[in-house]
Image: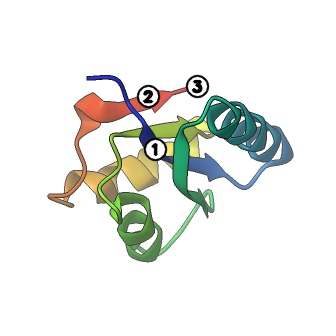
């Protein structure tokens, strides 16, 4: 299945923000849909709010642009979230 709808997630550093924005622009320019763009901090109490936003809307795929540290925390939270499928997640 080819993805049409995606949610993009990124850490809050400037290179990740810029890469996520550029990817979103390219994605939508090709006629596909970005459901949401979610950012997260390097450290958080639980990442629950960000994980809920990231999985809302049941996208065809998730695209991640993040530092290893921030993504590790977010990924641990997502692993507890039934709506997330790591097989449909792509890291840039």
SS of the residue at dot 3?
Answer: loop
- Quadrant placement of the N terminus: top left
Whole-number angstrom distance, CA of label 2 to CA of label 3: 7 Å
Which numbered disc flags the more N-terminal residue, 3 or 1? 1
Residue visible at 74% across and 39% down?
A: 25
Residue 43, relative to residue 10: is it above or below?
Answer: below
Residue 54, relative to residue 92: is it above or below?
Answer: below
Q: Which mark is residue 27?
A: none
Q: Which residue is mark 3?
A: 92
Q: Which mark is residue 6?
A: 1
Dots 2, 3 in contact, CB < 8 A? yes
Residue visible at 30% across and 33% down?
A: 88
Indicate left or right for 72 with 34 as reference.
left
Answer few, some or many: residues within 10 Å of disc 3's Cα (few below 14, many 20 plus, some between 14 and 19).
few
Residue visible at 29% across and 56% down?
A: 58
Residue 19, image x, y percentages = 75, 35
Whole-number angstrom distance, CA of label 3 to CA of label 1: 14 Å
Residue 42, image x, y percentages = 62, 56
SS of the residue at dot 1?
Answer: strand
Q: Nearer the viewer, mark 2 or mark 1?
A: 1
Whole-number angstrom distance, CA of label 2 to CA of label 1: 10 Å
- Figure coloring: rainbow
Q: Nearer the viewer, mark 3 or mark 1?
A: 1
Residue 13, image x, y percentages = 78, 49
Q: Which residue is mark 2?
A: 90
Residue visible at 59% across and 35% down?
A: 31
């Amino acid at each position: 299945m080819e993805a049409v709808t995606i949610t993009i997630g990124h850490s809050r550093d400037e290179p990740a923000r810029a890469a996520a924005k550029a990817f979103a622009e390219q994605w939508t320019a090709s006629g596909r849909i970005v459901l949401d763009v979610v950012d997260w901090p390097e450290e958080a109490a639980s990442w629950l709010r960000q994980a809920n936003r990231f999985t809302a809307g049941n996208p065809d795929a998730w695209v991640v642009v993040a530092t290893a540290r921030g993504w590790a925390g977010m990924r641990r939270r997502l692993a507890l979230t039934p709506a997330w499928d790591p097989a449909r997640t792509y890291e840039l």
